[in-house]
């Protein structure tokens, strides 16, 4: 393991190699040069947003390896840590809003819209692993239109998360939909998994969807939030650039109207200076950030940043049900019934279950 890297960067390199189609732990010189070029191009697209003849972020085609590699190299490490800082921010304002894992497997259900490689799950695992020593099972609903991310995302689970958090098991549910369309029939196929969501993550996706599609994006999000069975923590993190505002604010305002706001900011600078969210560049060939940003290889050095500006929001969507899920389970147990996988009510095996009595 490269001792000069942060835990996340130690493992991200093999994911970058996977994006380029290799299977070693280290980028070859050609892959490194191509990653550096790609990360500069992606940064330019997010910075200029259509000015100077650059394409809009909505035109980035993540089917292409160079765009996936460039995105992960440019923003992967910061995005992996942002969700940790986001949860800490929620805890400082409303500690009870942090969902508690439940059930005999200590389960948490997370839904990510525009998941990409879902590196934001790293920060969520980091947060829960700091506060819970027990084994944790995360059911992860990834809502994503681009299938090319799938093998890269799986490698993030296997290479990054499993190694960094051996006590956390990830159980992914792949939901391939385009949020610009009416995807309700497709989302409904995953009803059970989506309706049990504890945390809904919307990271760096709204700004990629042109404002003309807001109506459909909202329709899909509304379907999700209306069907949540529990109180759900919603976390949004998007670029703070002025030109992205119309795409982000419209949905944020609608969400605020439907939920309890915890915190929001149009623009906040997140700095990654201290452990466990330290982004560092040590002058050593072992350090991936040094190879990406610190050396002059084949042209300009890309700038190195250990901070990022983001527009963010956190809120709680209260469940509509007046009866808590726990009360429903108790009631079903009293009736000797259980809910089957497809939603049917089935007889429950009463031999091995606790017997409840009604005190009338
Ligand atoms: C910039 S990446 C963000 C990935 C990850 N959430 C993060 O923060 O690092 C945006 C992702 O959203 C996906 N996306 C963009 N528009 C989408 C849409 N209309 N429906 C579903 N996914 C979409 C893209 O394919 C891409 O993977």
Image (cartoon, rainbow, N blue to C red):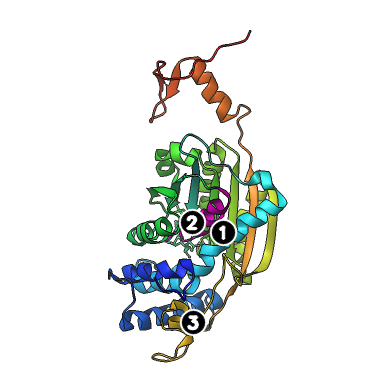
Residue 127 colored magenta? yes
Q: Residues within 10 Å of mark 3 (few under 14, many from 20)?
A: few
Q: Is residue 202 above or below residue 240?
A: above
Give the camera-side residue of 96 and 173. 96
Residue 336 at x, y percent in the picture = 45, 15
Q: Is residue 209 above or below residue 137?
A: below
Ligand 1 has an atom within 8 Å of the beta carbon of the residue at disc 1: no
Q: Is residue 320 above or below residue 203?
A: above
Q: CA distance from mark 3 to mark 2?
A: 34 Å
Q: Residues within 10 Å of mark 2 (few under 14, many from 20)?
A: many
Q: Which residue is tagged 3?
A: 53
Residue in the picture at 34% in, 68% down: 19
Residue 291 at x, y percent in the picture = 43, 82
Q: CA distance from mark 1 to mark 3?
A: 33 Å
Q: Which mark is residue 121?
A: 2
- Residue 298 occupies which quadrant of the picture? bottom left
Residue in the picture at 41% in, 49% down: 170
Q: Earlier in the sequence, mark 3 or mark 2?
A: 3
Question: Badges 2 and 1: C-beta atoms under 8 Å apart?
Answer: yes
State the extent of the magenta-drawn residues as a range: 117-132
Give the camera-side residue of 74 and 208. 74
Residue in the picture at 40% in, 55% down: 162
Q: Which residue is tagged 1?
A: 83
Residue in the picture at 41% in, 67% down: 11
Residue 298, visible in the rendered structure: yes
Q: CA distance from mark 2 to mark 1?
A: 7 Å
């Amino acid at each position: 393991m490269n001792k000069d890297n942060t835990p996340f960067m130690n493992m991200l390199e093999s994911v970058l190699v996977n994006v380029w189609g290799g299977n070693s732990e280290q980028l070859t010189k050609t892959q490194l040069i191509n990653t550096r070029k790609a990360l500069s191009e992606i940064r330019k697209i997010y910075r200029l947003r259509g000015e100077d003849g650059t394409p809009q972020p909505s035109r980035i085609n993540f089917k292409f390896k160079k765009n996936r590699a460039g995105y992960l190299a440019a923003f992967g490490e910061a995005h992996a840590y942002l969700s940790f800082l986001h949860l800490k921010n929620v805890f400082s304002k409303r500690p009870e809003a942090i969902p508690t894992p439940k059930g005999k497997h200590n389960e948490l259900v997370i839904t990510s819209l525009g998941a990409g490689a879902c590196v934001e799950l790293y920060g969520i695992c980091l947060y829960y692993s700091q506060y819970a020593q027990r084994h944790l099972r995360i059911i992860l609903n990834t809502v994503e239109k681009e299938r090319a991310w799938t093998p890269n995302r799986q490698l993030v689970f296997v290479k990054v998360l499993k190694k960094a958090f051996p006590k956390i098991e990830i159980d992914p549910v792949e939901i391939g939909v385009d949020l610009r369309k009416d995807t309700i029939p497709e989302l409904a196929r995953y009803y059970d998994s989506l309706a049990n969501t504890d945390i809904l993550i919307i990271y760096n996706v709204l700004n990629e969807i042109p404002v003309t599609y807001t109506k459909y994006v909202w329709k899909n999000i509304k379907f999700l939030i209306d069907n949540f069975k529990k109180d759900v923590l919603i976390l949004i993190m998007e670029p703070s650039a002025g030109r992205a505002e119309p795409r982000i604010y419209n949905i944020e305002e609608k969400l605020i109207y439907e939920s309890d706001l915890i915190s929001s900011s149009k623009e906040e600078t997140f700095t990654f200076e201290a452990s466990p969210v330290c982004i560092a560049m040590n002058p050593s060939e072992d350090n991936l950030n040094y190879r990406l940003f610190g050396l002059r290889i084949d042209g300009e050095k890309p700038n190195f940043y250990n901070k990022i500006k983001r527009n963010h929001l956190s809120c709680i969507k209260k469940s509509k049900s007046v009866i808590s899920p726990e009360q429903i389970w108790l009631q079903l147990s009293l009736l000797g019934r259980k809910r089957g996988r497809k939603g049917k009510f089935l007889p429950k095996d009463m031999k091995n279950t606790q017997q409840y009595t009604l005190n009338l």
